[in-house]
Amino acid sequence: MRALCVLLLGGLLGCRQHGDGAEETALRTQFLKDEMTGAGGVGAWEISAQPGVRVGPEWGGTEPSVSGGRFVFAHRWMGQFGSLRLLAGASGDMVLHLRGVVQLNTLRGPSVFHVRAAGFHLDTFSAPPNEEKIEHDVIIDRATIERFRKGPYLYVELEATSSSGERGYMGFSFALQGISWRPVAPP
C-alpha cells in the first residue's frame, strides 16, 4: 500500500504545471515547424500556423500532396468566396501576401480576384493569362485598417470572378499555398 501511495504522490508531483506553459508551447511549435519544413512541408506550415492570420470556414482543409515520402506542396481551396481574419494590432501599414494556384478550367474565363474589407474595395488582381500560379501582395494602410477593424481584427473577403465580372464557377477557384500578414518593409 505504501508503494502505491508513493507512486501516486510521485505521479501527481511530476504532473504539476510549471510556469504558464509558454515555453513548452514555443518549443512544441518550433518542433512541428522544423518537422514539417524538414519533410518539405514549408507550404503546409505557411497556411496552417501563420501568426495573426486565420482563414474562414469557406476554405477547405489543409490538403498535403506527398510524393516519395516528402511534401510536394500543401494547399487550402477556396470556392467563389473566402474570408480571412487578420490581427490588426500593428502600428503601421501592413501587407497581406497571397501565394497559390488557380485551375484554369474552373472559372468562366481568366480568374480575377477582388479583395474587400466590410464591402470596401481594397484591391483587384488577376492570374496571368494561361498561368496557374499567383503571387500577390495587398498593401493595406493603417487608416484603412483602423476604419474597418472589428475589435482586434480586420476581416477581409476574397471573391473570384471571371474577367468579364461574371459570377459563378465550376469548382474551386484558388488554392492557397502560402499566406503572411506583416508590416510593410521600410523603403
Image (cartoon, rainbow, N blue to C red):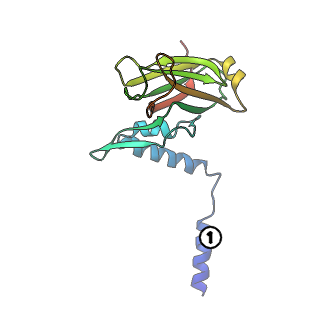
- Report the side of 140 relative to 98 (left or right): right
- Report the side of 130 relative to 96 (left or right): left
Q: Mark 1: which amino acid? A: Leu
Q: Tell me where residue 79 appears, x and y as whole percent.
A: 49, 33
Q: Tell me where residue 173 appears, x and y as whole percent.
A: 45, 30
Q: Secondary structure at mark 1?
A: helix
User: Which residue is under mark 1?
Assistant: 12
> Vertically, is 186 above or below 180?
above
Q: In the image as oriented, which residue stretches furthest toward the bottom?
A: 1
Q: Residues within 10 Å of mark 1 (few under 14, many from 20)?
A: few
Q: In this view of the protein, which residue sits in the foreground, 179 or 36? A: 179
Q: In this view of the protein, which residue sits in the foreground, 93 or 119? A: 119
> Vertically, is 13 above or below 156?
below
Name which residue lies at 43% across and 40% down.
44
Q: In this view of the protein, which residue sits in the foreground, 6 or 160? A: 160
The image quadrant that residue 105 belongs to is top left
Name which residue lies at 49% across and 18% down.
125
Does residue 185 appear in this view?
Answer: no
Q: In this view of the protein, which residue sits in the foreground, 32 or 107? A: 107
Question: On the rendered image, what quadrant is the N terminus found in?
Answer: bottom right
Q: In the image as oriented, which residue stretches furthest toward the left?
A: 68
Q: Tell me where residue 95 appears, x and y as whole percent.
A: 55, 22
